[in-house]
Image: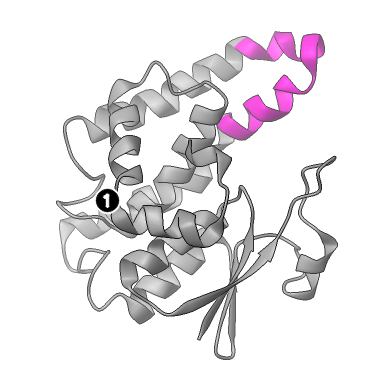
Amino acid sequence: MITVHHLNNSRSQRILWLLEELGADYEIVSYQRDATTNLAPESLKKVHPLGKSPVITDGNATVAESGAIVEYLIRKHGRDKFMPAEDTPEFVSYLHWMHYAEGSAMLPVMLTLYVMRLGDAGKPLHPRLESETQNHFGYMESAIGNRNFFVGNDLTGADIQLTFPLEAAKSLGLLAPFPKLNDYLTRMHERPAYKRGIERGGQYDLGK
């Protein structure tokens, strides 16, 4: 049985979504952020030394990091779905978007979140942040274009990964200038498996 150590309003929600797409059996151990600090509870460190979510256990395996979890689940439980064959050109694109989600797309989102907390002291950084947001989200806007998915003609792990940066950006008001990304995000949210993941995981404000 797969166990998902699930933190509210976190990257672990996309793991629940993927498991629903896979039709896999899983259970959830839920954790709540501190109401004051918004940080994960110390109890998560009993599962993994970093004390972060998501973390899954699958038999004797403990897997942390969203991208690693997505790849692990697809390779072990995907039944040749949710990733292109490795000998196809689409696989290179798949690798790019899988790693781009956290390696690049999340950077301007996280920096914006922290700079917002600085108030007036952060104003000198606003032009650079706006430039980086336009650069990265403009790139994704152009890439998705009129496509339904970022890679190929079906949902892949790349879409699972990319949806979270878009949700986080939308929660900070950064996604308004990018209509194609907004439309794409709406399509992902309308998937039955996405909705089932929300039902299993509980309140998820980033998904609104």
Disc 1 residue crowd, few under 14, some 14–19, many 20+, Cα 10 Å = some
Residue 150, placed above or below residue 45: above
Residue extending farthest bottom: 60
| Most frequent secondary structure within the magenta stretch | helix
Q: Position of residue 12 (x, y in %)?
A: 56, 58
Q: Position of residue 200 (x, y in %)?
A: 50, 62
Give the image quarter of residue 181: top left
Residue at image location 45% in from the left, 36% down from the top: 166
Residue 105, placed above or below residue 33: above
Between residue 51 and residue 9, name the one nearer to us: 9
Between residue 127 and residue 16, name the one nearer to us: 16
Q: Is residue 105 visible?
A: no
Label 1 residue SS? helix
Q: Does residue 123 show up magenta in the picture?
A: yes
Give the image quarter of residue 112: top right
Residue 39, placed above or below residue 134: below
Q: Position of residue 192 (x, y in %)?
A: 30, 55
Residue at image location 76% in from the left, 54% down from the top: 40
Q: How many marks?
A: 1
Between residue 166 and residue 193, name the one nearer to us: 193
Specify the segment rendered in magenta.
Answer: 109-126
Instruction: Say what amino acid the circle numbered 1 marks.
Output: Ser
Between residue 141 and residue 3, name the one nearer to us: 3
Residue named by callout 1? 93
